[in-house]
Image (cartoon, grey):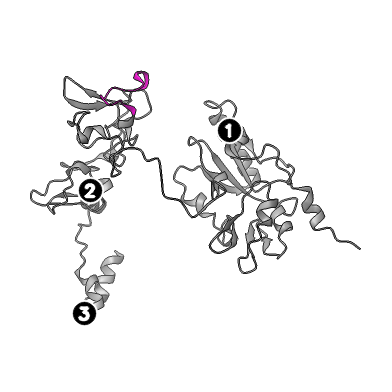
Amino acid sequence: MLWKKIRELYADSNEPKDQIIKLLTWNYPQEHMVEHIMREVNGYDLSTGKLLNGIGEIKDEGTTNSGMWIYAGVMREGGVHMAKRRGQDDPGNMGIYPGYGWVWLDNIHLLYNRASCDENGNPINPDKKIIWWDVAAKMWKGYDRPDVGSLTAAPNTPAGQKPFRMVGEGVGRIFAASYKDVEDGETRDSSSTPVDGQYLSFMSQSSRRRTPACMLGCPEGAISKKDSGAVVIDESKCVGCGYCRTNCPFNVPRIDPERNKSTKCDLCFDRIEHGMIPSCAKTCTAEAISFGTKVDMIKLAEERLKEVRMSHPNAQIYGVHPNGVGGTHMMYVLPEPPEVYGLPKAPKTPDSIDLWRVKWS
């Protein structure tokens, strides 16, 4: 293990700055090491040594310990690893499958599900009930783990009344802090925000048939197109004029008001140049983003389209065919028409951009 090697290197050091390394421990047995680490992450009662069954058992007076509070309850006494469960029952027929695996927090699949009930603990929509207050049993029950402070806390008590228990006031917030990347009422890269978990994007590596409008409209020559097709902004040349955003049919570039520089996704061109795929496609756990050749991405998009149309008959592939901008490097599987997601139905490069670059002889 890397940690043991580091400890060996600092074993004879008397430097004060190295003491933190010598004080740390890694005494987990080699066999079933991951499970032992997860027990530590889960947390336990310091007086009894027993594992915590959930976040409700974590105390703030020093009698419990948890490596990461959101995972409290994933490991149980008797060597039970909750994430390895494979129960197939879905009692509410809502796709929750409470006995399959484990999710944080407390195996609650629908966070703040208390909000699905009224002040008396009765489901607002009885046909789609998730949790409810059982008057006879005097406890919360449901097809999902009720998201309340205590399962025995009645609806009229503080612990059973507040639907948003993870915020101080316990209720939904009307006002929220402003975000620095908000511009003109939209967040940066808002055109790539998933909707209903069905917004899938596919990036293809091919060349456009036209020079990007943002590149043509930049008076400072700060925008270039790489051999990979990635469109990149050189911030050292950018003066923040905003012409790139004005001429982009998709309103992709954003002007950072603090630095007065234009910003946009650069398709991780440096990774592509080294044979790697963009970071978003690499790290997306839902596999909602893919990267490859245009032929491969069209094939994948068509396969995914068939799946999405089973629940969204109006689904379509957006950006795959040449259009008023000469084609794009991004294509999307959209459950609804592009206008729903803030995308133009028929994107077109502004005629003014052609006049901008006309060279008179």
Residue type indicated by callout 1: Leu
Q: Residue furthest right?
A: 361
User: Is 226 colored magenta in this rendering?
Assistant: no
Q: Marks 1/2: CA distance? A: 40 Å
The structure residue drawn at horizontal position 68% and vertical position 50%, both measured from the top left corner, is 248
Circle 2: residue type:
Asn
State which quadrant residue 85 falls in: top left
What is the secondary structure assignment of the residue under circle 2?
Answer: helix
Relative image position of residue 16 (x, y in whole percent): 22, 79
On screen, residue 218 versus residue 355, left or right, reads: left
Q: Which residue is mark 3?
A: 12
Q: Which one is earlier in the sequence, the residue at label 3 or at label 1? A: 3
- The residue that mark 2 highlights is 42
**Mark 2 Cα within 10 Å, few/some/many (few <14, many 20+)?**
many
Residue that extends furthest to the bottom in the rendered view of this protein: 14
Read off the residue under disc 1: 305
Dominant secondary-structure state across the stretch colored magenta: loop
* Mark sitting earlier along the chain (1/2): 2
Q: Residue at x 30, y 31 (%)?
A: 114
Disc 2 versus disc 3: nearer the observer: 2
> In terms of image quadrants, where is residue 239?
bottom right
Give, as a single range, the part of the protein colored magenta.
116-128
Question: Which quarter of the rendered picture does the C terminus lie within?
Answer: bottom right
**Marks 3 and 1, Cα distance to the nearest angstrom?**
62 Å
